[in-house]
Amino acid sequence: MEARAKPLLAPPTSGLREALQGAVFPLSAQQLTRVAQENGAPAAVLTLLGGLPGGEFRSLEAVESHVSHG
């Protein structure tokens, strides 16, 4: 029987930097989602951003950290 390679899963933050290019922080989750939509982000990134809690994010690193650690 031939072994099949499992597809590599992208890290949760994959695509965030590209999706949020040009964002001027601090931004709310809703504002982050809007920026990502304007930048043509894939649905997976929009879903991640849509799951962020309320409040403001002060940097891209803060967004990445929250997405990575839930």
Image (tube, rainbow, N blue to C red):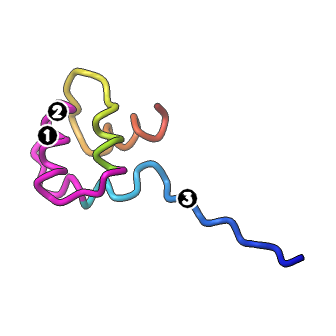
Drawn side of residue 65 relative to residue 56, left or right: right
* Mark 2 Cα-neighbour bin, 10 Å: few <14, some 14–19, many ≥20: some
Amino acid type, residue under disc 1 in the picture: Phe
- Numbered label attached to residue 30: 2
Amino acid type, residue under disc 2 in the picture: Gln
Give the SS element for disc 2: helix
* Mark 3 Cα-neighbour bin, 10 Å: few <14, some 14–19, many ≥20: few
Give yes or no for residue 54 being in the magenta stretch: no
In the figure, 39 relative to 1: above or below?
above
**Earlier along the polypeptide chain: callout 2 or callout 3?**
3
**Earlier along the polypeptide chain: callout 1 or callout 2?**
1
Closer-to-camera residue (27/38): 38
Where is mark 3, residue-wise? Answer: 9
Q: Please give the range of residues in magenta.
A: 19-44
Drawn side of residue 68 relative to residue 29, left or right: right
Give the SS element for disc 1: loop
Q: Residue at x 75, y 72 (%)?
A: 4
Question: Farthest residue toward the right?
Answer: 1
